[in-house]
Amino acid sequence: MSSYTPFRKIFKDVSLEVEDLYLLESFQIEMLPGTADRDLAVVLWAYPSIKHFLVKKCPSVVDLIESILKQYSPAEDEQELKKCSDNLVWTIADWLVYSKCPEAYDKLDFHSWDFREVTIITPLDGRVVVDGAAGTGRVTLEAARTAGRVYAIEPVARLRQFIRDKALEAFLNNIFVIDGFLHAMPLPDNCADVLVTSHALGWHLEKELREFERVVKKGGYIIHCPGTADIPDEEAQHLRLISPDWGYDFSVYEESDGWKGKYWKQL
Ligand SMILES: C[S@@+](CC[C@H](N)C(=O)[O-])C[C@H]1O[C@@H](n2cnc3c(N)ncnc32)[C@H](O)[C@@H]1O
């Protein structure tokens, strides 16, 4: 789960405030309980309108939110409220930055990994490519320069618009940006030649891996550059990907902050 400390450094030019919580998408609100519950409770006690917004936008969290409010009491003073508000927004800073200032996310150094890491596995020329969890569209735009069509799947509305704007600026008319999740892609069976994910995998790993194999044609490629080093959670993901059940090949590639794992398979 996100920790506020690295985000303060990563997004040092960004300012976040409690009202930015109104930018959350319903799938993010669903993941909010369990993230920073004490801070969340203090904020919701102080700002009932934010609580209303969260439960209206994502009704399934109502019971969890009520139980967090029962567990924690309101702030004792303004200083405590300020501290909890600040902790909360910086704990989920990535989610807020996606919608508040996608350009700040787009500028991060990690985007500069060499896209030939994908094209040495398979050329994209004239192909139908899917960029799953497309973010600000780094992979989408790189792919669209040679691919026939690129479908960018991204659940955050502001990011989808950001990709569309970038495509327009770059005169790329072969990019189709669609709302969706890795585990539920609004695409027909066997429609893609290549599916790529970058810095995005494992919210629902097994469902996602099945979904990729539904969408990609026989003979097509699935390529993941999750940008992860080997911390325990991701070690489990690594073992699953290379297991005989899923059969991904594995190698490493370099990003701005070190070596990362890369996974791919041909169906
Ligand atoms: C760390 S960013 C990576 C974005 C982009 N692929 C890149 O390399 O910059 C993760 C992205 O996944 C999106 N996301 C979060 N949960 C998702 C899910 N379950 N399915 C698809 N995308 C998801 C987020 O909105 C965000 O844009």
Image (tube, grey):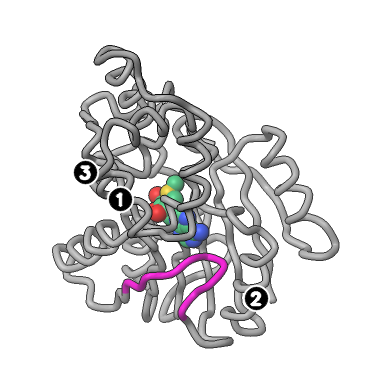
Quadrant of the drawing holding the N terminus: top right
- Magenta stretch? 177-186
Whether residue 183 appears in magenta in the rendering, the answer is yes
> Secondary structure beneath disc 3?
loop
Residue at x-position 45% and y-position 74%: 129
- 111 vs 156: above or below: above
Residue 52 is labelled as 1
Q: Which residue is mark 2?
A: 213
The residue closer to the viewer here, 34 or 41, is 41
Q: CA distance from mark 3 to mark 1?
A: 24 Å
Asked whether the residues under the numbered discs 3 and 1 touch, taking CB atoms below 8 Å apart as contact, a structural biologist would say: no
Query: For residue 142, which quarter of the picture?
Result: bottom left
Q: Nearer the viewer, mark 3 or mark 1?
A: 1
In this rendering, position of residue 197 left or right of residue 90: right
Q: Position of residue 113 (x, y in %)?
A: 44, 44
Q: Which residue is mark 3?
A: 101
The residue closer to the viewer here, 258 or 164, is 164
Q: What's the amino acid at mark 2?
A: Glu
The answer to which of marks 2 and 3 sits earlier in the sequence is: 3
Q: What's the amino acid at mark 3?
A: Cys
Residue at x-position 48% and y-position 27%: 72
Whether residue 59 appears in magenta in the rendering, the answer is no
Quarter holding ligand 1: bottom left
Q: CA distance from mark 2 to mark 1?
A: 39 Å
Q: What's the amino acid at mark 1?
A: His
Q: Position of residue 170 (x, y in %)?
A: 18, 64
Residue 265 visible in this rendered orientation of the protein: yes
